[in-house]
Amino acid sequence: MNHVKSYKHYESTENIRYTEGAIRNLPKRFETMSLNPPDCKDIRVVAALDIGTTHSGIAWSSSSEFEKNPLRITSLQWPTSGGSSQTANKTPSVLLLKSNGEFLAFGYDADKKYSELANDNAQYGYYFFKHFKMLLYESKELQSDMILCDIEGRTLKASDVFVHIIKYMKDLLLRDFKDRGNAQQEENIKWIITVPAIWEDAAKQFMRDAAIKAGISKQRLQLALESEAAAIYTKEVLLQRSISTKEDEEGHTIRCQEGTTFIVTDLGGGTIDTSLKEVCKSNQIRDFHQAVGGPSGGQTVNGEFMAFLEALLGKEVLDELKMNHKGSWLELEREIELKKKNAKGDRDGRILLLIPADLVDIFESKNKKKLTNAAVFETQYAGKVDVKGKKLRVDKGVVDSFFRKCLENTIKHIESILEKPAATGSEYLILVGGLAESEFMKTEIQKKFETLPMTVLVPDEPWLAVIRGAVMFGHRPSVVQSRIAQFTYGISVIRCFLEGDDPQHKTIENGVPFCKNVFERLAKVGQSYQVGETVTTEVYAHREGMSKMRIKLYKSPEQEPRYVTDESCTPIGQLVVNMPGYGTQRKVTVSLCFGEEEITCKGENELQEEVEVQLRLLG
């Protein structure tokens, strides 16, 4: 490919005026080349860690089993709070630490121990974290040293929380292998960490850094985008069903072949991701549109449950329970989580909600009356809620209303995908994630899109679709052919001032007019990038003795931003390029890849020797 001469140079994070020529070539898209660590040929097991907002899990399969049947994936069984004889394939995402920050427990075990401490009023001094994952989505300027608050308001570095969890899950699986008589060497295990596709680039880097700090080698670590992992799993399910000519529950024949397009909606605990995929040659998949979504997952439903109880019993009653009866509060949260997934109702169409005795006592103490039907009749829920001792029988229509906000946002995201020309002819809408268990969500989504020639499918055990797909992705990353850029990415350059340029960006150097703050595009939002495809640009030293070049990286939702100072542009980090040697003629070719799960980069000097280039997205 011919190089195009230009009169541009980078604007650095350093307070330095650059000489003309610090960059002498426009960014270009080059041939495919992998920037990820090379696959380890001695990998015998792929293990996925799925740390969700509400629940987490571990799954794995051996390379030999994957070759026989990709869907034969094992999930670690977690002892539940019901006893060692009862197990589940996911555990609550809760972490209990000692007062000095040392690990104490995770999951059901942490929930149980903290409840016991709270019941004895002995929880003070301990850290108890839950729903912490949403911080990585909600924080728009992630810092490597950012702080998390536990349920009591005590603070700890967020990285410590995630490192504790990843290390515990990793070590737990290794112990499980050993107990089964199937001890695996860590160098034979490839680890996959799941992250939402709609996360910011910095949040993905935060998870990668935490995994490395937890003891996972970066050579055997890979991130998996959650909606993409779910698509990989459901594609394989569709493929096997189509081979067996199996029909779905409504009698539709399943078809999965090259050209089949389908929508995957991951109804998670914190976020909802919706993506459009197409089946390609060799059973690969590719993005047909960038993922869309937002923070309207299952926790939205939990919030509506709590708002209902607040309206029914009073805000002061709920606040008292939360502040001074932690064990009972956690008991109530567990009951809501259970009813959220299984809200079918009894023969009278009512759903039974068990409420803690402390909640009844607080209500009666503050209101100087018994919690009876007469008390409920005084609220907006008269005739819709019955009181039976320590139980509330709630009209199913009331419970269904708790899902409305989540449902409306989910439908909005799906419709935004369906509006795209690429979605024309989509054959399946596949619902996965914990909330896909909800009969209400499934039924209402089917009703909404019943006039379209598109089948709504929910795979068996939809809450495991992401983690199973992550294991499959780890075995065969090449299953993903291409991805679509979520944003337009670029750098700031100075070039010759042209007619039509904004005068406020004009600067004079050696009598020559230049335009500063120009957005030099590297990747374009909505554009497809092959996995491994790179964008390259050449960086020249602007000082004889400089050892590093620091270049800010920007993003924008617009396709053609003009200046990095535009309102739509946001600085997301910097490229730190090592500049070996001496003199101003030193050149490093920087390659960036926008088709991977996360932005990757590498550098090469004139001798084609590897040069370190770091992408720093965390402050």
Image: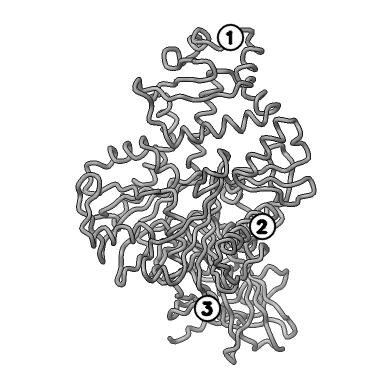
Is residue 504 among the parts visible in the rendering?
Answer: no
The front one of 429 and 371 is 371
Query: Which residue in the protein does label 1 denote?
Result: 370
Query: Which residue in the protein does label 3 denote?
Result: 42
> Which residue appears farthest toward the bottom when viewing the image?
607
Residue visible at 40% across and 51% down in the picture: 274
Is 466 situated above or below 595?
A: above
Query: Which residue in the protein does label 2 denote?
Result: 163
Q: CA distance from mark 2 to mark 1?
A: 48 Å
Q: Earlier in the sequence, mark 2 or mark 1?
A: 2
Mark 3 Cα shell of 10 Å, populated few (<14), some (14-19), many (≥20):
few
The front one of 106 and 410 is 106
Measured as percent of width and height from the top left, residue 245 is found at 20, 58
Is label 1 in a helix, a strand or a loop? Answer: loop
Is label 3 in a helix, a strand or a loop? Answer: loop
The reply to whether callout 2 and callout 1 are in contact (CB within 8 Å) is no
Residue visible at 50% across and 79% down in the picture: 41
Display coloring: one colour
Q: CA distance from mark 1 to mark 3?
A: 67 Å
Mark 1 Cα shell of 10 Å, populated few (<14), some (14-19), many (≥20):
few
Task: Between label 2 and label 1, give the one nearer the viewer.
Answer: 1
Residue visible at 60% across and 80% down in the picture: 539
Mark 2 Cα shell of 10 Å, populated few (<14), some (14-19), many (≥20):
some
Q: Is residue 512 left or right of residue 234?
A: right
Residue visible at 29% across and 71% down in the picture: 281
Quadrant for the C terminus, please.
bottom right
Is residue 400 among the parts visible in the rendering?
Answer: yes
The reply to whether callout 2 and callout 3 are in contact (CB within 8 Å) is no
The amino acid type found where label 3 is placed reads: Asp
Q: Earlier in the sequence, mark 2 or mark 3?
A: 3
The amino acid type found where label 2 is placed reads: Val
Task: Between label 1 and label 3, give the one nearer the viewer.
Answer: 3
